Each structure stands twice: as C-alpha cells, then as structure tokens.
Image: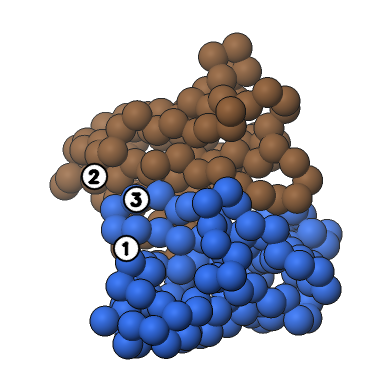
Amino acid sequence: AQRVTQPEKLLSVFKGAPVELKCNYSYSGSPELFWYVQYSRQRLQLLLRHISRESIKGFTADLNKGETSFHLKKPFAQEEDSAMYYCALSGSNTGKLIFGQGTTLQVKP
Amino acid sequence: GAVVSQHPSWVICKSGTSVKIECRSLDFQATTMFWYRQFPKQSLMLMATSNEGSKATYEQGVEKDKFLINHASLTLSTLTVTSAHPEDSSFYICSAFASSPGLGAETQYFGPGTRLLVL
C-alpha cells in the first residue's frame, strides 16, 4: 500500500535549536518525495523535492531508500519557520500526491 | 511564478442545494488538476484527478455523482457539490499540475482553498 507517515503531530522547539521533522513512506516502486509547507492563512506551497537535492530556507531532506525515510532538517530553527509541514509522495508521472498527516512546527522565541 | 486561484473563497449554502467551485491556473496551462478535501487539523485527502477533455478519475470512496468535476479548458476545472449536506462541509483545495519546462517541471501548484459550510 502507498502511504506516507509523519509520526509527530506537533513539534515544538526554541529558536536556534535544530529541527528534524520525520517522514516515512511505503511504496513498492521508486517514488518522488516532497515537502510542502503551509504558513498560517496561506496556501500550500512546495518547500523542496528530493530530486532537486537543494536547500530551501535552510531546510534539507535526504531520501533514505533503505529506511524509506525522507526526514526534513534544519540546523537552526527560526520563528518564521512556524508552520504546518506535509511530506508527500508521488509514484507516477500523473503527478498524483499522497500526503502525510502533517506536522505542526512551533518555534518559540 | 505559477498561480492558481479558486472561487469562491468561502460559501455558505442550505442543505440540498448545489455549489460550484472554480479552479483556475492563471499564468500557465494545466492538463491535469487535482481536487482535495481537508478536514480541520487533518491532512489533504485526494478526491479526484481532473484531466482536460476527459472524465475525471475519482479516488476510492468518493462519490462521482455527488462531486461532479468538469475540466473544460487547460486553465479551468470546476467541482460541483450536488445536493450538499452538512457532512459535505469542508475545505476544498485544488491544485494544477505544471508539466511545461521553466515552471519547475512537474510541480503541483495549489489554490488557496474554498471553505464550504452547509447548513
């Protein structure tokens, strides 16, 4: 079965602390993995995708096929990073996305 | 960048009426659009895939006669909630799949969502 699991509903850290938002997936083929972010009262937007292997707003994510994980990391969290983060998987060239349950990141001053 | 709009942003209707929600890609053409439903504090649930010029593909458990999808052009898809009932109250989000180069190829761009409240 195709599934994306984000085990933490809420992650609360202090400003400047490292952040890791966990994402595990289940897929029989070779999926493409994404992280989407939704800031308060804004639409969902793409943060990064594994094939790009880039760092956006200080966030990185590495696809670990052995552990079927795509954890999102940032070494020093900022207050403006507070948002809802969704891990998503696309398994075909149709673009269809399967979302995880989402993790709310709260960065305290 | 690519922008997707939705109209209306919110709607309140009486039980039994039908509501149409529009999703437009403003500066790019989208052969494929997706419709999602999101309950409070929950994730997005894919309802259907809308392909220009063909019938929509519905996910398991989504009633196609209740949620009518039309993708009449490369920039417009509509979702009509027919004979709406209070349990249809939700946040409906569309996305457009940009497959042309130069837009972050094969990327989904999301609309702002439409909040539906059925009384």
- Please rate how many residues cluster around mark 3, counting C-alpha atoms within 10 Å: few if below 14, some from 14 to 19, many from 20: few
- Chain identifier matching the brown colour in the rendered picture: A
- Mark 1 is on which residue type? Ser
- Chain identifier matching the blue colour in the rendered picture: B
Q: Residue at x 59, y 32 (%)?
A: A2
* Chain designation of label 1: A
Residue wearing tag 3: B42
- Please rate how many residues cluster around mark 2, counting C-alpha atoms within 10 Å: few if below 14, some from 14 to 19, many from 20: many
Question: Are circles 1 and 2 on residues that touch, CB within 8 Å?
Answer: no
Foreground of the two, B48 or B114: B48
- Mark 2 is on which residue type? Val
Instruction: Report whether B62 appears left or right of A43.
Output: right
Q: Position of residue B35 (x, y in %)?
A: 57, 64
Q: Disc 3 vs disc 2: which is toward the camera?
A: 3
Same subunit, labels 1 and 2: the answer reads yes
Foreground of the two, A30 or A53: A30
Query: Residue A98 falls in which quadrant of the image?
Result: top right
* Chain designation of label 2: A
Q: Is the residue A27 above or below the residue B36 in the image?
A: above
Q: Secondary structure at mark 2?
A: strand
Q: Residue at x 26, y 81 (%)?
A: B119
Q: Is residue A58 visible?
A: no
Q: Which mark is residue A107?
A: 2
Q: How far apart are the two marked residues, 3 and 1, measured between alpha carbons?
A: 15 Å
- Mark 3 is on which residue type? Gln
Q: How far apart are the two marked residues, 1 and 2, measured between alpha carbons?
A: 13 Å
Q: Residue at x 53, y 84 (%)?
A: B20
Q: Which mark is residue A56?
A: none
* Chain designation of label 3: B
Residue wearing tag 1: A40
Q: Disc 1 vs disc 2: which is toward the camera?
A: 1
Same subunit, labels 3 and 2: the answer reads no
